[in-house]
Image (spheres, helix red, strand yellow):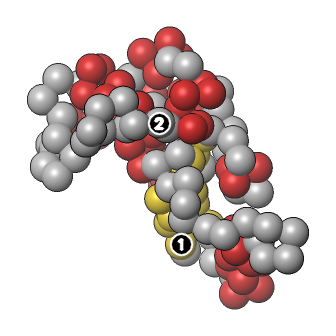
Amino acid sequence: MKVIDRDRESFVSSSKNNQYQYVIDKCEEMGFGLYVTNPCFEFWLLLHFDGVFELDREKLLKNPKVTAKRRYVEQELRRLWPGYKKSSYKAEKLLKDIDKAISNEKEFCEDVAELENCVGSNIGKLITDMRTQ
């Protein structure tokens, strides 16, 4: 199993060298599940809040800098979760809303190949798979 935080510059992608597809192919070849959140892990955290549906999907995908220190996704997460800090947060607060995050994820892209260029996550699929094993 591989879990990837899909930051925009994480992979080189050109017609001659598509590293993202290479990772997908290698994981399939090795029998690994590949789990990705795009544009970044904080998007998975945003999925725990229904306010995620009010956000601009293009801005979510591009995740531009909105301050000298923060990008759009983190800024919106901080707005929806007062007190959130990237370096230290109470994950147990999110546990009670894990089913909401899994459900909310279904409204975004979950296909690992499409996650190269689409906003979404398939971490919910990972959790669902783990629950059934």
Task: Name the residue at 50% across, 12% down.
Answer: 54
Q: Is residue 67 visible?
A: yes
Q: Quadrant of residue 13?
A: bottom right
Locate residue 33, reporting x and y percent.
63, 70
Q: Is residue 48 left or right of residue 104?
A: left
Label 2: element kind: loop
What amino acid is at disc 1?
Lys
Looking at this view, is 17 or 112 the one in front? 17
Looking at this view, is 127 or 15 the one in front? 15
Looking at this view, is 14 or 25 the one in front? 14
Task: Assess disc 1: are there few (<14), some (14-19) or many (≥20) residues with their C-alpha within 10 Å of its C-alpha.
Answer: few
Relative to 102, say whether 11 is above or below.
Answer: below
Task: Name the residue at 57% across, 38% down.
Answer: 62
Task: Name the residue at 46% across, 49% down.
Answer: 40
Q: Which mark is residue 107?
A: none
Q: Which residue is label 2 attached to?
A: 64
Task: Assess disc 2: are there few (<14), some (14-19) or many (≥20) residues with their C-alpha within 10 Å of its C-alpha.
Answer: few
Q: Is residue 1 left or right of residue 29?
A: left
Q: Residue furthest right?
A: 15
What amino acid is at disc 2?
Pro
Label 1: element kind: strand
Q: Is residue 123 visible?
A: no
Q: Quadrant of residue 24?
A: bottom right
CA gap, disc 1 to disc 2? Answer: 26 Å
Relative to 102, say whether 8 is above or below.
Answer: below
Q: Which residue is label 1 attached to?
A: 2
Relative to 69, say whether 125 is above or below.
Answer: below
The first of marks 1 and 2 along the sequence is 1
Q: Quadrant of the N terminus?
A: bottom right
Locate residue 80, reporting x and y percent.
29, 20
